[in-house]
Amino acid sequence: MTRQSKISSKDLENISAYLDNALSATEKADFEVRLAKSLPLQKKLKEYTQLKVALKKLSYQSAPRDFTLTAEEARGIKRKPLFYPAFSYIALTAALLLALVFTSEFIFNNFSAPQPQDTQATLMLATEAPVEENVAATEAPQIFTWGYGYGVGGKTEGMGGGGSTLMSTDQSGWGIGGGAATAGKDIEQEEVLGGEEVSPNEEPAIEDEKPEPTIVTPRPVVSVEPIIFGLRADEAGEVLSVFPTETLKEPDAQVPVEVETSSDTITVSNYRKYGLTGVAVLFGALALVYYRKQ
Amino acid sequence: MSELDLIELARNGDLDAFNHLVLMYQDAAYNTAYRILFDSAAASDATQEAVISMYRKLNSYRGGSFKSWFLRIVTNACYDELRRSRRRPTVPLEPESNDGELIESPRWMEDSTPDPEENLADSEMEKAIQHCISGLEDKFRVVLVLVDISGEDYESVAVTIDRPIGTVKSRLARARQKVQECLQDYGELLPEKFRLNDKELR
């Protein structure tokens, strides 16, 4: 029999659990074998047993009064409503969805491949085409070719660079082709005024370099002053040496510039975002109110 | 009427059934609260809070031992009470000696029942035990009271304190060890039966 006085914390746990009959069968058998050989374990078990008995003998403290509730008290106590958890879950789900929408939109807009620019130009034309189309329907279709200028950059395509195809056959293709709607006006002007506004870019030799013909819906005939970005007829010859962006520094108020960009086609409707935000805030607030009431 | 019937009625808003349940377990609740808090007023407050909380949460009762579920609420109320008392420490009304020490048994608190010797021994022992229990950390005291005084099993206590059974075992062992060491410090003040005779183990 050992007399080692040090008892590990594990042994103390085993003694305590043994006293409460909370050891499994194997643990109990193992412990009893060890207990039979160890005096300190026996001593500790005896101390714990005495303590347990003493604790059990502590006087029972009866309630000094009844703690029952009166009907009035019960009415004053609001029971936690069954739909309280539902509020929390709905608010949480809406918040998660909102976060998901913003995250996916951010990832999609920042890391997805850009769309081809000619697609965007087509989109712009399609957007503007319905304007005054009655007249256009009566005319024969014209064939327009695209110059090199259409692919200069975002600004160019935003303004419909090269839209006025008749005048944008040079490499810059800029000074004249202001936006799709403007292009239509330019075309009309060319026809109605008989080329009174002569485009400096109008050089037939370059037409041989046109990549491929494109059929475009004819523009309506409108009797308005020709709008040529940054150009006057008498200055046309000088414009060739001017860099295109210089002529576009100040946007013309008459030309509709707001064109829906392609990124709008891949974004989630703002209504959905507002809706999700509203749901999250509303149910979150309701859950908070109920929580505070409790 | 069985306990289950009473619970079902109480959940459906029957206040009498609810109060019947309260009467069934209020002594156990108060006793547990008293042993944890060692203050009758605080124990009363905690028990009342637990009853109100039980009424509010009755719909969330999911079966099992109703007493254990109620004691769990009582224990949580005691935790709240302990936190509250630590935030706002109170000054005891009991008289103090000249050196500022608390006189634990003032004359006006003495028990007037007959058989004073026996009562005195029991009273001294109980006081010593309660003093030792009170000296424990909350987490050890709660486990000791629930198991050794309220008679709850390890599983119920594990649910009550929201910890695994292993934690209950270790906390209980440490609590017993601390109380036992504390009682040994009382030495001669304890009755003979609580003083171990080391000779018998040699």
Image (cartoon, coloured by chain):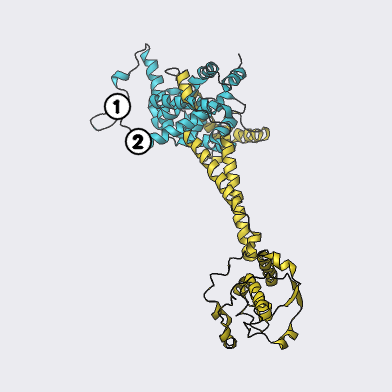
Chain colours: A yellow, B cyan
Q: Residues within 10 Å of mark 1 (few under 14, many from 20)?
A: few
Q: Residue at x 58, y 65 (%)?
A: A258
Depicted B95 relative to depicted A139: above or below: above
Number of the label disc, if any, that sits on residue B88 = 2
What type is the residue that disc 1 sits on?
A: Leu
Query: In the picture provided, is A124 more to the left or to the right than A43?
Result: right
Check disc 1 and report its element: helix, strand or loop: loop
What type is the residue that disc 2 sits on?
A: Arg
Which residue was labeled with disc 1?
Answer: B93
Callout count: 2
What residue occupies the far left of the structure in this picture?
B98
Chain letter for mark 2, please. B
What residue occupies the far top of the structure in this picture?
B114
Task: From the viewer's side, name the closer residue of A106 and A62.
Answer: A106
Task: From the viewer's side, name the closer residue of A111 and A70.
Answer: A111
Q: Which is more N-terminal, label 2 or label 1?
A: 2
Residue B107 quadrant: top left
Residue B202 shows up from this direction? no
Residue A142 quadrant: bottom right
Q: Quadrant of the N terminus of chain B?
A: top right
Query: In the picture provided, is A237 more to the left or to the right than B28?
Result: right
Task: From the viewer's side, name the closer residue of A85 and B135.
Answer: A85
Q: Residues within 10 Å of mark 2 (few under 14, many from 20)?
A: few
Residue B186 shows up from this direction? yes
Question: Disc 1 versus disc 2: distance between alpha carbons?
Answer: 15 Å
Depicted B168 relative to depicted A50: above or below: below
Q: Residue at x 61, y 65 (%)?
A: A259
Q: Position of residue B53 (x, y in %)?
A: 50, 28
Q: Position of residue B181 (x, y in %)?
A: 44, 34
Q: Position of residue B186 (x, y in %)?
A: 39, 30
